[in-house]
Amino acid sequence: PSGAPTGSAERDARTLTAAREQRTKERRLRTRDIVLAIGTPIVLLLAWELAARTDAIDSRLFPPPTRIFAQAGEMIADGTLLEHLGATAVRLLVGMAVGAVLGVLVGLAMGTSRALNAAFGPMFSALYALPKIAILPLLLLIFGLTETPKILAVAISVFFVMQINTVAGVRQIDPKINEAARAYGARGIARFWQITLPGALPFIFSGLRVATGTAVIVITAVEFVASNTGLGFLIWNSWQLFQPEQMYVGLVTVALVGAVLTGIFALLERLALPWRRGRK
């Protein structure tokens, strides 16, 4: 019939129009999200500045952001902030690297071996609940006032997060996928690289993001009490000397360190798991 092609063309046109409208809507939403993400902190900082300048809040306890930024500029210029940031960054990165690698390896082993999971799972669950900062005195007793206890405190906290997430990642793989792999001859190392590791990667990256926050908290707390360098020491020492501008500089820097590391892991996840991009 002569009307059939016309009707099909109209449906195609409506589909294209709807797709264009959807893309336009998504662009608008992304633009709105970016504006909100950037604008909200700016508005809050302006409100803080105004409140401090008009004595609506005590500027001795909550100095205006302009004074904090000025203090940060001075500390960058004289090298103080970079010295403390460098000390924290080394402890954090080394501890996270050691803890993450060991946590993933142990998690993969426990996830693929029922016997290992039965032997160590309950013990690791109990140790995970132990506040990691509580073992600092023991580490100091063993290793003294060196860098080792600070790095180990971070490594231990990261290890348990990564181990738990990795085991969960391996366990959630559909058994039918493993059966299909065995049917096609994928065994041992081949099955590990093709099935186990890719299946656990989303949980591993989720664990990395969680572990980053935990590691930042732990290293800051450790530097409060067992260090004379680092951002934690800077925050604690500034509080003791009642130097609120420096204390806020330390707090903001710690937050930025955590945000940057989390952003790096999110980017690495997008690169390592391209098949998940369409879900976000």
Image (cartoon, rainbow, N blue to C red):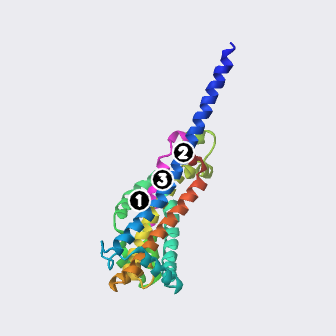
| Mark 3 or mark 2, earlier in chain | 2
Quadrant of the rendered structure where residue 225 is? bottom left
Which residue in the rendered view is the most extreme toward the front? 54
Which residues fall within the magenta stretch? 158-177
Q: Which residue is mark 3?
A: 111
Quarter of the picture holding the N terminus: top right
Please state the horizontal and vertical placement of residue 228, each as a whole percent of the image: 42, 85
Please state the horizontal and vertical placement of residue 129, each as a whole percent of the image: 34, 63
The image's mark for residue 167 is none
| Mark 3 or mark 1, earlier in chain | 3
Q: Which residue is mark 1?
A: 120
Quadrant of the rendered structure where residue 182 is? top right
Q: Secondary structure at mark 1?
A: helix
What's under tag 2, amino acid-wise?
A: Glu
Q: Is residue 70 above or below residue 210?
A: below
**Tag 3 and tag 1, C-beta contact below 8 Å:** no
Asked if residue 11 lies in the magenta stretch, the reply is no
C-alpha separation, residue under disc 1 versus residue under disc 2: 47 Å
Q: Residues within 10 Å of mark 2 (few under 14, many from 20)?
A: few
State the residue at coordinates (58%, 54%): 270
**Tag 3 and tag 2, C-beta contact below 8 Å:** no
What's under tag 1, amino acid-wise?
A: Phe
State the residue at coordinates (41%, 67%): 46
Pick the front one: 97 or 189: 97
